[in-house]
Amino acid sequence: MKNKNIIFSIICLVIITVLLAIPTGFERDIYVNAEHAKVKILDVNNSKINVMGFIRQGEQTAQVEVMNGSFKGEILEGHNMFRGSLSSDKVFANGDIALALIEKNSNDEPIFVNLVDFYRINIELILAGIFILALIIVSGTTGIRTIISFVFTLTCIFKLFIPMLLKGYQPIMLALAIGVSISVVTLILVGGFTRKAYCAIIGAVLSSLITCILAIIFGHYFNIDGTVMEWSESLLYAGFFDLNLTQIYQAGIYLSCSGAIIDLAIDISASIDELSLKKPDISRKEILLSGLTIGKSIVGTQTTTLLLAYMGSFIGIMMVYMAQGTPLLNILNTKFIASEILQTFVGCIGLVIVSPFTALTCSYIYKK
């Protein structure tokens, strides 16, 4: 069994490597005669900034030292343009580290330095390193397999799901195929080639199918189209007129709760696996009832977790509505809030039904 897990982990690493090597078809350098560089802000000039209330307009200039790339060590003048938007504008101070786009002329000399944003790659890598280290310390070899599962999921999303959506593949079927593949790989990596992993896979797949169906049905009756997704209109402006944004939104509903479905399925199957080891003579009916009882407690906390996770995405707009004294009926009927309600309850239903599916599957597999 240990050899199987090692071989499967190696296979997953090979698949990840192959996927990373395969081009998505959307690789292109949109910045001609320009390169990104890490720069240090030496001296800022705020004289060209116009402040009107909370909004800044104009331009911030700064002397910057290039820290890598073709112009490493050179002192250049950087420019930070303000758009009048608090969400996208940034203000640099002396000593800050920024990501800059350096435009060059035909002689490869710098002609303009655009200060794109604060440089966050280093701290992001540190945070990821802390996560990996904590996972390995707490979970050991299982933690290593969990990291492989984590990377596999990210690779599937960025190298398969998103590019294939842009190429016009059917969103729901694509999401289901990717989601099921991620579920199978994750559960086998975490649970091994065991009965508990097989039961969790069956329960998760059945719940995934019903969750997708519910997303389609209630998405239709809610009259919510895909433009409710942030940046969706930008896709249309970029020339992707043939994309079915509504189906992409519905596919996203399933994918956003698929991780919780996997979690709940393996929780129940692992509990039943331990129960069957402690009590080998347990009956099929007892397994089913025990699985349902275990599921009741887990579902209660999981649905609350899912609700809180979704609420975090629209807490700002809820504050705006409340500050304006908007009636609750109007709030619940708005397109954006209704879309979050749809996503929350479809996801919660998926969590609720995974419990009986997994328990029923365990009752048959553990007592053939």
Image: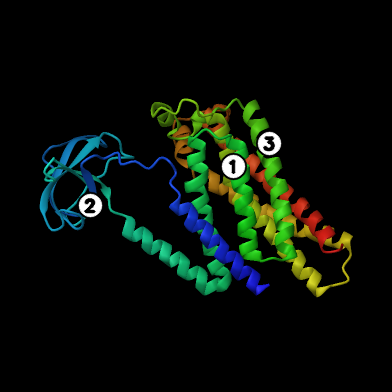
Quarter of the image where the N terminus is located:
bottom right
Quarter of the image where the C terminus is located:
bottom right
Quarter of the figure with residue 3:
bottom right
C-alpha separation, residue under disc 1 versus residue under disc 3? 14 Å
Residue 154 vs 367, above or below: the answer is: above
Q: Nearer the viewer, mark 1 or mark 3?
A: 1
**Along the horizontal axis of the image, is 58 left or right of 170?**
left
Q: Nearer the viewer, mark 2 or mark 3?
A: 2
Quarter of the figure with residue 250:
top right
Residue 92 vs 222, above or below: the answer is: below
**Residue 22's x, y, as percent?**
45, 49
Residue tagged 2: 37
**Residue 80's x, y, as percent?**
20, 42
Q: Residue at x 34, y 60 (%)?
A: 123
Residue 198 vs 142, above or below: the answer is: above
**Along the horizontal axis of the image, is 290 left or right of 40?**
right
Task: Kindly identify the amino acid type of the residue bearing the numbered disc 1.
Answer: Ala
Residue 188 visible in image: yes
Q: Residue at x 47, y 66 (%)?
A: 132
Task: Kindly identify the amino acid type of the residue bearing the numbered disc 2.
Answer: Ala
Residue 229 vs 281, above or below: the answer is: above
Q: Secondary structure at mark 1?
A: helix
Marker disc for residue 175: 1
C-alpha separation, residue under disc 2 versus residue under disc 3? 47 Å
**Which is more N-terminal, label 3 or label 2?**
2
Front residue (pair 353, 111):
111
Q: Secondary structure at mark 3?
A: helix
**Residue 341's x, y, as percent?**
59, 36
Marker disc for residue 214: 3
